[in-house]
Amino acid sequence: MLQPENIKDTLHAYQMDKRCNVKRVMAEAVRWGARGARINSISPGIIVTPLALDEFNGPRGDFYKNMFAKCPAGRRGTADEIANVAELLMSDRGAFITGTDFLVDGGTTASYFYGPLKP
């Protein structure tokens, strides 16, 4: 059960939040599908923005540099790459896609669970 005492730390809280969003998107896709709508979400990884650049050059910069070096893509993402996914989802090419979350993180999450970023 989702109760404050069951949340181990901030990372665990974040992971739970993301999982809840995935489930919410699935449920809403069923509900809104009856009206002809498609519901999806995009979960971007670290994307190059002015705020992200502040993070890269701040006290946690080495953490981020290590993360990018050890993810399958080997780099940070761009806003255009997230926009490309959104374009697919909103176009006729994405007409059969509904009820899903697109993790666009260059493989960082995969590396956390199965690769060199594994704790």
Image: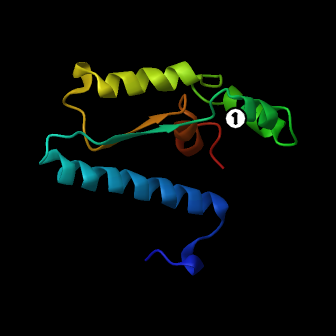
Residue placed furthest toward the left: 34
Vertical placement of residue 19 versus 103, above or below: below
Mark 1 lies on a secondary structure that is helix
Front residue of 30/68: it is 30
Q: With respect to residue 36, does 15 lie above or below?
A: below
- Tell me where residue 80 appears, x and y as whole percent: 53, 19
Report the residue at 85% width, 32% height from top: 57
Q: Nearer the viewer, residue 89 or 3?
A: 89
Horizontal side of residue 90 vs 86, given as left or right: left
Q: Which residue is mark 1?
A: 67
Q: Residue at left 41%, top 25%?
A: 85
Query: Relative to 1, is 14 on the left or the right?
Result: right
On screen, residue 113 versus residue 55, left or right, reads left
* Residue 42: image location, x then y, percent: 44, 37
In the picture, the quarter occupied by the N terminus is bottom left
Instruction: Where is residue 53? Give x, y as percent.
Output: 77, 30
Viewer-side residue, 64 vs 116: 64
Where is 66 relative to 100, above or below? above
- Horizontally, residue 25 falls left or right of residue 67, namely left
Can you tell which quarter of the image residue 36 is in?
A: top left
Query: Residue at the right extreme?
Result: 59
The residue depicted at 57 percent of the width and 24 percent of the height is 79
Which quadrant of the view contains residue 86?
top left
Mark 1 surroundings within 10 Å by alpha-carbon count, few (fewer than 14), some (14 through 19), many (20 or more): many
For the residue marked with disc 1, what is the amino acid?
A: Met
Name the residue nearer the viewer: 99 or 83: 83
Seen at 62% across and 45% down, the residue is 118
Residue 56 horizontal/vertical position (percent): 79, 33
